[in-house]
Amino acid sequence: MKKFITLFISITVVLGSCMVGSKYQQPAVVTPTDFSNNANADTVALVKWFDLFNDTALQSIIKTTLSNNKDLLTAASRVEEAKLQTDIIRINQYPSFAYQVQAGGGSAGNDALKVGGGISGGFFKAAGLLNWEIDLWGKLRRATASAQAQFLAVDENRNALRVSLVAQTASLYFLLRDLDNRLLIAQRTLASRKESTRIISERFDKGYIAELDKFQAIQQEAQAAALIPNIQRQIAQTENALNILMSRNPGPIARGQNIFDQLLPPDIPVGLPSQLLQRRPDIKASENALQSQFERIGIAQASMYPSFSLTGLLGFASPQLNTMISNGFVANGFAGIVGPIFQFNQNKKRVEVEKVRTTQAQLQYEQTVINAFADVSNALTASKTYAEEYDKRKIQADAGRKALELSNARYNYGYTSYLEVLIQENSLFDAELQESLLLQQRLNAIVSLYKALGGGWN
């Protein structure tokens, strides 16, 4: 028996190097030769998010979000769960050991003993048990590889969530600083128009101007006043959105630098398009999911072949406890083989099902890559065009301030009507609001580009 078991183990160890099915290879995808509108294609590592932003208040908000966000904590828990599941599956490749201890007794007549109706006397049994499925065709190894790939996919999904949370936090913060600036513009404009209404009302009372000018001034004042509660409402909603990301109750958000003092690099090195495959967490997660599914083909193929197992028992058994050690030694070993014969092609169908699912996973991976390239291209275009648009809006706002100053002087000296002043006031008000909005969009375009590149989440 010992020789047989030794020979069986030797044969299975040698044959254990066999594995049915093909080896996973990274799918080939067509990558663009370059990103459009990319003026800086140097292949360099992206800096961390905290090195990208120089606003300490924003850095604090991001750190709090990454520490407290419930969705991110849930994702981290899923990573730990996947790791434990991988360990459980991996351990199936190794022999399992158990123990068994029994004691009992009974009384049965001769006729009862003939038909197995019980036992007569006592018995004692203590033994160690061995059970080992020999992974001859790689089924267990494939299952382990699939679980490991799935674990990596879950981990990369968490990283992708971190990228998204940081980008979302930064975007909301820049929106908040933009709203703060727009509120200042509205308040400053309201104060100016209140003064204009006072002066024009006095002139009307003295008969210097028509009543129409007075009503036009009141309209201008009301227009600026109505915008203030609108912006205040948006500020409260944005603060609440940031508090939700930080898993905090509603409350004020600490501010740092104003929107005009936010300094971000004008050009972010995006590297080569092919590097995006190794840099974006969602792409890596999709490929790991593809590999996990690919390994399931091998599991299904291995199920079509016979499985080999070893079982053994080593211990003591005796009808009397005092003789169990001296005379009750027990050693048994068994080798088994189980395999399918005829199952109406069920196993073949299972293999085909896994192949179809792998095709689906590959299509999803390819679509993820296409979406990623589009994200980068869109973000590059947005970053470039928002910068150009903001420069023009800044020129418009600067010119509007000078034009309003001249119109007021012309009106005060009687060279023009109040209509010209109204036009210039409205034009400047709109230009200043647009300048603030465009600066916020320019900053958010840089955040979107950084997110599209998949860098800086750590």
Image: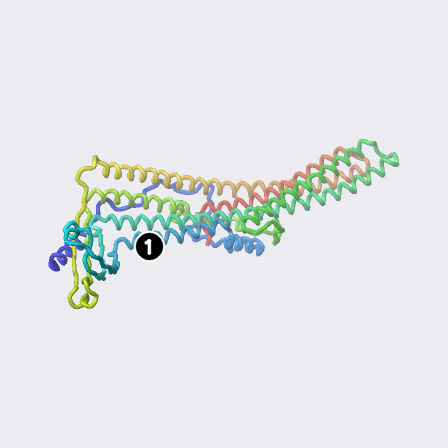
Q: Label 1 sits on what residue type?
A: Asp
Left or right, residue 118 beside residue 360? left
Where does residue 427 sit, x and y in percent of width and height? 68, 37
The residue that label 1 is drawn on is: 87
Foreground residue among 218 and 47:
218
- Residue that appears at 49% across and 42% down: 379
Foreground residue among 97 and 297:
97
Placement of 149 over or under 425, stated as above or below? below
Mark 1 surroundings within 10 Å by alpha-carbon count, few (fewer than 14), some (14 through 19), many (20 or more):
some
Q: Quadrant of residue 216?
A: top right
Where does residue 421 sit, x and y in percent of width and height? 75, 36
How many numbered discs sit on the rendered protein?
A: 1
Left or right, residue 292 beside residue 51? left
Where does residue 146 sit, x and y in percent of width and height? 31, 48
Q: How is the image coloured?
A: rainbow
Q: Quadrant of residue 339?
A: top left
- Residue that appears at 35% across and 52% down: 85
Where does residue 290 sit, x and y in percent of width and height? 34, 43
Query: On the rendered image, what quadrant is the N terminus found in?
Result: bottom left
Report helix, strand or loop for mark 1. helix
Placement of 346 over or under 285, stated as above or below? above
Foreground residue among 80 and 103:
103
